[in-house]
Structure formats: structure tokens, C-alpha cells
Image: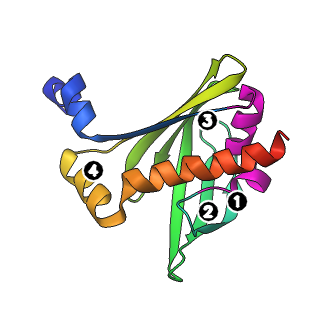
Amino acid sequence: MNTEENTPNDIARRSIVVSRTYDAPRELVFSMWTDPVHIVKWWGPSGFTNTVQEMDVRPGGAWRHTMHGPDGVDYKNDSVYVDVKRPSLLSYQHSAPRFLATVTFVEDGAGTKVTLSMVFPDAELRDRIVRDHNAIEGGNQTLGRLAELLSKETR
């Protein structure tokens, strides 16, 4: 990859970024992303359910899960954690489609701002995923489902 491909504008063209602030402490929000008991309750767009086969949250650890779509289609997902800094950062490499996901957890008053960034190898793949899978809306729905679960957990 040449340096031009890593300019801020190029990275932005290859990225999907969604963000949301939760009225919950950072440790709790982080655990929702790293505990399979919790993540199966909210991960994915509206209507999806999940089965986690493996979730080894450490650099080099695997996260393997199957997303079950509302249309009955199963979507196998395989990722490897690249970086884990409890409770501020998760980063993982997703295999197919290939992208690097980085999740930051920033204290915002009594709450937590979460930003999920997915960087694809090229803008064409990013655009195809957005078009074919409605990925931006799906990302926002996913973060919305987490908000619903957190509201129940913090009552």
C-alpha cells in the first residue's frame, strides 16, 4: 500500500463510522461488547439473533459467531482481536468481508460515548457493503439495540 492510500481522505472513503452516547458507565458498556452472555442479546441490526462459538477477548484471540438474519439466512463471522485495552478500546480484524474494526469507549460525564469505525481495504468494497447490506443503517440499529439493553440493565 502506498502512502497516498493512507491519507485521512482515503481512510475516510474506505470507512464506516457510527457513534452513540449511552447513559451508562464505561466498564458496563465495555463488558456488553466483551461478554458473550451480553453480546448475543443486542449484536446486529434489528431482527438479528446470534450464536457465539468463541469469544476470546485478548490480542490474537478469536471471536467467532453466527448472525441469524430475520430472513432465515445465517451469516458466519470470524474475527481476530488486534488490540484490547479495558475499558477504552477494542480492535479486531474481520475476515470476510475484510475490514479492521476499532471501537472506542470514552467517558462522557456519567455516560459513555462509543465510536465504531470499520476500515475496508478499498472504497469499492466499503461502498458495496453499504449498498448491498445497508451497513450504515445496520450499524446505527446495532448501537440502538445496545441502548435498549443498557436502559434495562441500569434501571
Q: Residues within 10 Å of mark 3 (few under 14, many from 20)?
A: some
Give the amino acid type for the residue marked by disc 2 in the picture: His
Q: Which of pointers 1 and 3 lies earlier in the amino acid sequence?
A: 1
Identify the disc placed on residue 59: 3
How are the residues colored?
rainbow
Outermost residue, right side: 155
Relative to 74, is 91 above or below?
A: above
Q: Gap between marks 2 and 4, in whole Å?
A: 22 Å
Residue 58, horizontal then vertical, whole percent: 67, 37
The residues colored magenta run 23-43
Give the secondary structure at mark 3.
loop
Give the secondary structure at mark 4.
helix
Outermost residue, bottom side: 72
Q: Is residue 117 visible?
A: no
Give the secondary structure at mark 2.
strand
Q: Image point 63% across, 44% down: which residue?
A: 61
Relative to 96, is 27 above or below?
A: above
Q: Gap between marks 1 and 2, in whole Å?
A: 9 Å
Q: Judge from the rendering whether residue 127 lies leftward or rightward of residue 151; answer left or right.
A: left
Viewer-nearest of discs 3 and 4 = 4
